[in-house]
Amino acid sequence: MATVSYNSNAIFIDNKSEIIISGAVYYPRATPAMWPAILRESKNAGLNTIETYVFWNLHEHQRGHYDFTGRLDLPHFLDLCHQQKLHVILRIGPYICAETNFGGLPPWLLDVKGLVARTNNEPFKHHMLEWCKVLMAKVGDYQATRGGPIILAQLENEYNNVAARYGQEGQAYVQWCASLAPILGLTVPMIMCEGQAQGVISTLNGFIVAKSVARHRQHHPNQPVLWTENWPGWYDTFGYRHHTRDRREIAYNVMRFFAAGGTGVNYYMWFGGTNFAREAMYLQTTSYDFDAPLDEYGLPTGKSRHLGRLHQAILANKAFLVSGRDPKINVLVPPMEGQTLPQLAVYNFKHGNESLLFAINSQKIAADVTAGHKALHLEPQSAQLLKQAGDRTRVIFSSHEKPTRLISRNWKPLDLDLDWREFAEPLVRPKLPGVTLDCPVSMLPHTRDLTDYAFYNTELTSAVARTVTLTLPMVRDFSTVFLNAVRIGSQPARLLENNSGEQWKHTYRIPLRKGRNTLQILVSALGLIKGDWMIDAPMTEEKKGLIGHISIDGKPVRLAWQLSVGLMGEYLRCFQEFPGQLVPWCRLSPRTAAPLRWFRTTFGSLSADALGYAIHPGSLCKGMFYLNGHHLGRYWQLPALEQKEAGDENVLIPGSPVGEPAQCYYHLPKELLQKVNTLVVFEETTATPRGLHVHERTTA
Ligand code: GAL
């Protein structure tokens, strides 16, 4: 059993002060077979702590059915952390944001009458508490205070993002979250990031937080300064360029943070991984690589090696940073107007007869300085860490040092000679669950978020043959219109991440024939939003499907609708070896160009020694991949238009060119491979998988 406490300088574990060097690794975004190597590589890079969110949305996707198996085996993940002697920061949420479906909340909450999430709302608090109790029964014993690895626990997440919407009621809710500790048996200190309750450690998130440390200490004088989310890259969304962040700039900002008085950092993400199946939030790519120090395949990168050297240098000298004395700061160029940190300075942390020095140049020009007895040349926006003993001063880390060994990775296509079969998704689907509607409504209560797809079917009668304008008042997210079994078109061409309406109205010209016409609108969803701001309303107002009466030539028409849930291929489980074999698969015809097709192929065993495997979709456009019955995720090969803005810090660099999809390779986990492998694709457009290749990750 250990005690966990804190003062203004550090977290104390068993009365020993710690500098926290933590990395976010989210267990569902890797396969369990990947966990040991990821944790080992994390340890090798000097991490002493792993941070994970808990994914209520995945553990209880269907109400009352709890899943802690496979990728969701959190106790096993915690055991592995413990075995590696890594502490754990458990961010319970249960609202977690995290670019996961519905920000970590289970979608069935949408069916609970009167429920509004993340405010002082009894139904929400009731379900949140029920879940937290189930969770704590599983992981409560993993707290350090009971002999386990968990040293800190977070409830809620970045409440400031929604605080204005919920006002006093919101504050009452946050305070209620803090009061749950005794009810849940939480005996380690509680943290909250960017919006906190009284009595809880308040923490910082951001690309660069050094500038906020002094103010944070004034507001929270008895707390250590923890940086819960240091973003070493960013997430990607379909249709926008991939993001990257430079390892030198990250190291420089971590050094500025510790020099300014920080005592713990968590890289969000250290390992980003993959949003398997339908687990990604709206528009988020299947890859959650994040340009994280460990790549999507769990492999070390130049970034993890570089930061690893910084971590080792800091941890070997932690006594200087936790000793409780503020550094002596030699300010060589004072802060710019309106800023808090000097532009050029040497920070001297003394301990006994020795010193730890941070020489920091935040200017956009290089600078020559003397730190201790050492003359240094500092690159623009760079930092060096030095150790001084007697009259000897030596550099122990430089943010801009050149890598000793370059790690470069590549992809090599495998020559598998794939033979594809196809199965056309039928438009007439008598077997599928259906419901009659007087007016189109959100499909979520009917799909229960078990599928992205639903058909809204109706009939239109026309006295004469004529082409009319069909208006769908609200569609979330895509519509594909079929008139008399002929595809008319799909909308929209691309999506905005924060979408409060501009793209919901779809308009088509449709050629009605005289008499009865069948109108079918296939709606496909692309994940639930992660927070209120994405729809500018409480997130529990999230909807998918066709909503509201359609209009013909501007006039609303009331029709009888049949909502048919899911795809026939899903219903027949055509992606599984059995019963998938029973589906009438046909040879891929060289001539047909029909939308909505399932494709299936098999290939033999692949070497287990490879670093990793991925699918390159070739000319496929939008759909889903399955391997041996496992849903690997959604794909959408939309060429990127522009860089998406992420904060105002200007630290992200576009990592892929305009015109290239945000994601080109889709993780094929080694753990799911068999002697004979069945790969199934569902494609929404007329594209085929002829150009699809399986690639191997190589060191090159
Ligand atoms: C933070 C949030 C995380 C994640 C991150 C972006 O604001 O707390 O959960 O969404 O942004 O990657």
Image (cartoon, rainbow, N blue to C red):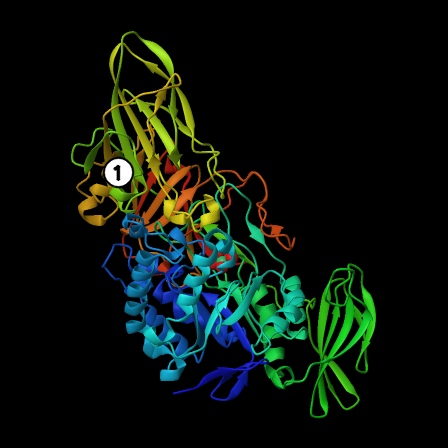
Which x, y percent locates residue 270?
Answer: 51, 65
Whether residue 673 is visible, yes or no, is: no
Secondary element type, mark 1:
loop
- The picture places residue 166, in percent across and down from the top left corner, at 45, 54
- Near-viewer residue (151 or 131): 131
Q: Amino acid at mark 1?
A: Leu
**Screen quadrant of the N terminus:** bottom left
Q: Residue at x 69, y 68 (%)?
A: 401
Q: Which is more toward the observer, 187 or 81? A: 187
Task: Kindly identify which residue carries mark 1.
Answer: 567
Q: Is residue 290 left or right of residue 393?
A: left
The number of callouts visible is 1
The image quadrant where one finds the C terminus is bottom right
Graded by Cα atoms within 10 Å as few (under 14), some (14 to 19) or many (20 or more), the crowding at tag 1 reads many
- The residue nearer to you, when weighing 102 against 26, is 102
Q: Residue at x 63, y 83 (%)?
A: 317
